[in-house]
Amino acid sequence: MKNLKGLLSFVVAIAVLLIPGVCKAEGMDETSFVNAIEEANQNSDGPTTITLDADIVLTKHVGITGTVIIDGNGHTISASDEGWLDSDKSDQSLITATGSTANVTLKNLKLTNSKKYGAQSYNGATLILDGVTVENCNFGGILANGGTVVIRNLTLGHNGETSNNGIEISNKTTSTPKLVMDGKLQSSQTENVIWIAINDGSTFTKYEIENTENTTDKIYTHNGQVVVTDENNNVIFESNKNEKVMATINETVPAIYYVTINYNGNTKKIAVEDGKTLAESINLDTIKNAVDGKTFVNFVLADGTVYDENTKVTSDLELTAQYKDVVISENNPNTSDKILTYVSLVAISGIALGFGLKKRFN
């Protein structure tokens, strides 16, 4: 029986290794990783999943033209400090999804120490980032170069030799770059988390942005900038401006207005979609209850006009929250009732306690 079980286990293991579209080899290194990618590029039957069981150090960039899922399994892909092949200086990203046939998903993976970008979507390719961290790449974190980048769960550290360059939107192809928000974007940086390339020549005249139905963060455009908001509609990232490049949007990206609220020494910038009110765009309780010992009165505009939070927003606004001291007065019937009720409860509690003690010691 033992021998039979052992034989069955061996057969199952061999069968798993032979399943088309699955690659999980023990002790994977650069050579076996590149070989797996090359095989996946030839597989036209569906996605090939490559699961890492070790960190990979590359000496040249990896190009993907097929439908591939790279599951990092918590590991890292980085560039070698020495011995990097410079034969193709036009592409020194760690991983490039290239061409309209490429549909690449990176998950549970860290990309770092690239000579240029951590990953690139090029000329009609689709690159999906799910549980990916990118940091310490010389040019930038992610490049949408005439390709589509889908953000499901992306964390960015500092990327760029000097100033930060998180996600760069550019185009040196005949395809239109596209950025799709399908989850959450986080960054340790605040500047240039999204960068619209400036000196990319005449081919870069437009880009597209889109939100999926169930995304947590959202992406918009406002006054020529790409804007990212969190689940509470707080503006968390703003790109630079490039007046020569226009954003193309669809129904998933409504127009927005900025409502800047000053309160208790803090400032909050909210994105309110066209046709909505401030009250339905954000939970205002945090602002209204921000000052201890004071009660919220109203919001006012710069000229002192009181602003109704239930009014539809039709332009950018700056508001200031006003508060007043909470005054306890004997002439206030409500306050007197509360004090009287409290005193009564204390008295009743004292009587009950005294009666209990007397009964205990009798």
Image (cartoon, rainbow, N blue to C red):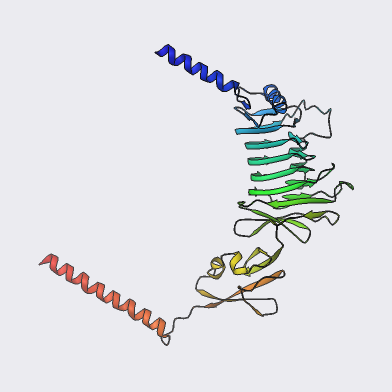
104 and 235: which one is in front?
A: 104
The x, y position of residue 351, in whole percent, is 21, 74
Q: Quadrant for the C terminus, please.
A: bottom left
Q: How far from the left and from the top, in percent, is residue 207?
A: 79, 50
The residue located at (39%, 13%) in the rendering is 1
Tell me, yes or no, if residue 263 can be seen here: no
Task: Classify 320 as above or below 60.
Answer: below
The residue lying toward the viewer, choosing from 316 and 350, is 316
Can you see residue 236? yes
Residue 43 placement (x, y as % from top left):
69, 27
Residue 203: give x, y in percent of width and height.
87, 46
Above or below: residue 289 compared with residue 122: below
Q: Is residue 177 above or below residue 287?
A: above
Residue placed most toward the observer, 71 or 22: 22
Q: Which of the 4 image quadrants contains residue 304?
A: bottom right
Compared with 131, 329 (above or below) is below
